[in-house]
Image (spheres, grey):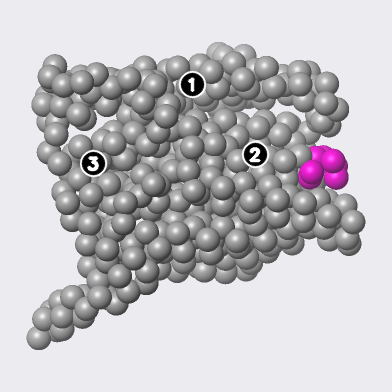
Amino acid sequence: MEIAAVSASTSRPEFRWLAELPGLLRLALPLVLGLSASELISLTDTLMLASLGTLVLACVSLTASAGLIFHAGLYGMLATLSVRVGHAFGAGDAGAVARTLRAGLGYGLLVGTLGCLAMLGILPVLRWAGVPLPDAQLLTPYWQAMAVFLIPFCLAVVFKDVLEAIGRPWVAVAVVMSAVVFNIPLSYSLIHGHFGLPALGLMGAGIASVLAESLAVLVAFAYWHLAPSLALYRQAMPGPRLAWRTLVGEGWPLGLGYLAEAGAVVIAAWMLGWLGTAALAANQVVQSIGSLLYMLPLGMAAAVSIRISQARGRGETARIKAIGSATFISVSGWMVASTLLLVVFGRTIAETMSDDPQVIAIAVPMFVVVATMQIADGLQSTALGALRGLQDYRWPVGVTLVSYWLLALPLSYGLAFHSPLGPVGVWVGFASGLAVAAVMLPWRFYRLQGGPSGLAQPQVP
């Protein structure tokens, strides 16, 4: 009787999202772990480098902020691969999956190389523009290493996207988490000089990250070429060749949107740099934890994108609105829990990661502000994923540009430099932009589904 009651309740339109929730969570869990890999590398490096002092943490924070721009933009450029593969997998077209992977690897190598060259070129521009650098001599080799990191990063993202979209998300987790496993002993050895290796400090952390990510890509290549279950996708399939130009055309709007969002975050971090080294170090402490908690919304964003694209490939468009609703509701619950966690334990976390009283004093209220904007951040991120699954790429870019660049950044600047809030004001202002995006992007999704009570799916422009 109880099972029948549950089944009856999920058949009602307002509860159909409950039927989609288990499948979303099963897919999202490995996706969250996979997305956490780069954050875990950053977190372990931060912990290992913390003993070298506040100046080193400030260099890591500045480089991580700049790297965030490139990671986000490149991830966005490649994210449409999962939508294309998910649609082909849902339609049972193994040939399209194989062709997408082959084209995607070349495309990933291209955009990764261009991203590397751009990051290398931006450092002298920052010096020329007068952006305050904590220590140029200490910063430069680490910055260069993290620029090279973008090449294997992009190749790993291609494999991750394809494996997730063909129903092998745990294999994708094993691939990307292998980079974390490789990174820990490499960083420990190269930072502090163990096992006969030189003590390279900050530069050693950068070299370790490049080596670890490259080894993870080799693991992915080996699996793809040796796994018997993937033999179907390794065959030469007849069909039209997928041109890089097509992938660029699909990827640039999403890449621009992610770039605009990440660029706004980076400029906010640079504002903190203008307020002093302690503010920059405090931001690194707060963001290393906040970014880790944010992995669930990012994983759910990837999951909803794949689930919607697979449903469209199978012609099951009536499920799409329920898939989106299940995502928004579950992510909101997680972000409320994350908010409470950061508010209650912010001081303890700050004292664990730094022994500088000034850094701790800034980080504690910053934890509270970052915590309160987690819900809006989670909603806007998962709504972007849902719209990506619908192949609605361009409209969200306009929302991102307005909410972050016309609202968030001017308010952040005003509150940081012209109010008593100081460093905390940067994130208070930023929260306003997130709030706008958190309203507009889910509204767009439901509008494309025919409104809150409709199930029709109009043609996506």
Q: Position of residue 156 (x, y in %)?
A: 39, 27
Between the C-alphas of marks 3 and 2, the distance is: 30 Å
Asked if residue 129 can be seen in this view, the reply is yes
Between the C-alphas of marks 2 and 1, the distance is: 18 Å
Residue 274: within the magenta?
yes
Q: Position of residue 220 (x, y in %)?
A: 30, 25
Q: In the image, what residue type sits under mark 2? A: Gly
Q: Residues within 10 Å of mark 2 (few under 14, many from 20)?
A: many
Q: Residues within 10 Å of mark 1 (few under 14, many from 20)?
A: many
Magenta region: 271-277
Residue named by callout 2: 263
In percent of the image, x 49 and y 53: which residue is there?
381
Q: Is residue 103 above or below residue 282?
A: above
Residue 97: within the magenta?
no
Q: In the image, what residue type sits under mark 3? A: His
Can you say which quadrant of the picture contains the N terminus? bottom left
In percent of the image, x 61 and y 58: which residue is there?
434
Check whether the beta carbons of the residues at disc 3 and disc 1 lie within 8 A of each other: no
Q: Nearer the viewer, residue 236 or 346?
A: 236
> Residue 258's mark?
none
Residue named by callout 1: 112
Q: Earlier in the sequence, mark 3 or mark 2?
A: 3
Q: Is residue 227 above or below residue 57?
A: above
- Report helix, strand or loop for mark 2: helix
246 left or right of 87 in image: right
Of tags 3 and 1, which is closer to the observer? 3
In percent of the image, x 36 and y 26: which residue is there?
246
The residue most toward the bottom is 1
Q: Earlier in the sequence, mark 3 or mark 1?
A: 3
**Total tally of numbered discs in the picture:** 3
Q: Nearer the viewer, residue 262 or 49?
A: 262
Is the stretch drawn in magenta largely helix, strand or loop?
helix
